[in-house]
Image (cartoon, rainbow, N blue to C red):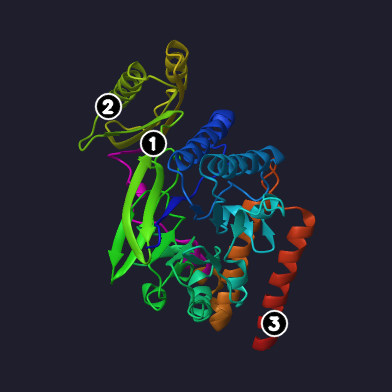
Amino acid sequence: MAEGLRIGVFSDTHIGRNIPRVLRDARRRAFRHAFKQAIDIFIENDVDYVIHAGDLFEKRSMTPDDAVFVKWEFYRLAKKIEERSGKKIEIIAVRGNHDGSPSSNALDFITHPMAEYFKVIGEKTLEGVEEAYVGDRLNVIGMGYHPYARRKFEEASEILKKVEADGYRILILHNYVEGVHNIPPQTPEHSVIRLEDLEKLDVDLVITGHHHERLGFKKIHGKLFLVPGATEAIDLGERGPFGVYILDVKGSELTSHKFVELEPLQMIGVRKIVSDEPMELDWFRRRCLEEIESFALNLDRDGILKLNVSGIVAGDEPFPQLGLQEEVQKLIERYDKLIHVEISEELSTMIRPDVKGVEGRISRDEIVKEVFGVLGERVGEAAEIVEDVAMALDERASERTGLLKELDRRRFSDRWLKLLSSYVGEES
């Protein structure tokens, strides 16, 4: 009888992330700390394969040091497993939105002929070319991130259906799937994959990155999904625990699985201060300082606190603000493990309508439709340019100015001119 396989799974490691900027070095260390722990867990569990579901890096223009760090950790994983068990493992990854675009992929920096254990799949799929990783008792297909994932996956599913191989079959994605993820309200519809398109594929497991909160295993319409979440809090408000998965499979069956939690380098706390009735501004200030001190007193490692403050302020000040910078700084100096406090204020007064109380947010997709609706059927072309600009800003924006270089700007300007001038021509 054939032996089973052990597969390590993780996603959204965001190596190089340094937000908030005031903690850039500390946060960069935290993401590396999580990555090293994940590699240690895979070694300890003697895995046969490792799957990464996208956003290996924080951005396409990562530092050379980030690339070297990841290369070394993957080499350490492959080397240790071979020394322990004589096995040659494979690491299989798809490109996430933070990893760049198909033509400018951060994963290219860690692929190398000498690193035969690292495979990137899902790029040829976007081009309509049949592609798969077919290994020992494992068959993996995938699609790299695309801002127009709905259309792209609908096209790709016809290609993916043609891939046939024995063993356990896995599909890796780095986009939201309707009915599977808790999709942010501002997410454009065209970037979400239809569940019905995915159901056409004969796979045993779908692993999806992009969703930072761990949802674990979900079975929907007979299809098994795994949403592993991130390995570290990408934004301070995101909830853990964060970690990796170890899967045991035999043939076409998942025989067991476990989630292994990672120990964060920094303790991140999220607290709310809410008043359902009008309170003096000093009440909000006192409550904030009490929460900060309570958090600081219980730290056993470096701590970061995010305070969400909301409510109605009694009084006639039209735009109330807490103004706690000095007091917060004093607490940071008093408690050496408290390294940062971020306060989000949503305060209104009885004399001013609470304009922040409007439910939901306007998505970029809705803004594009409103602004460029005059283009009629060609509004989709405008939306595509907007998405491409957003991706370019993520990948290639200047660290100093946040802007694109002239050559990149000119390319987008040319596309806008071509679209708008053709519309004017049609109208005339």
Residue at mark 2 to residue at mark 3: CA–CA distance: 58 Å
Q: Which residues are magenta?
A: 346-368
Indicate the position of residue 363 as horizontal and vertical percent values: 45, 61
Instruction: Quickly name the residue at label 2.
Output: 280
Observer-side mark, 1 or 2, equals 1
Question: Reading the chain from its start, which is encountered first: label 1 or label 2?
Answer: 2
Instruction: Quickly name the residue at label 1.
Output: 345
Q: Amino acid at mark 3?
A: Ser
**Is residue 187 shown above or below 398?**
below
Q: Which mark is residue 333?
A: none
Position of the N terminus, as image quadrant, is bottom left
Q: Are marks 2 and 3 in contact (CB under 8 Å)?
A: no
Mark 2 lies on a secondary structure that is: loop
Residue at mark 1 to residue at mark 2: CA–CA distance: 15 Å
Question: Reading the chain from its start, which is encountered first: label 1 or label 3?
Answer: 1
Is residue 376 visible from the viewing direction of this image? yes
Instruction: Quickly name the residue at label 3.
Output: 422
Indicate the position of residue 25 as horizontal and vertical percent values: 59, 29
Along the horizontal axis of the image, is 260 left or right of 136?
A: left
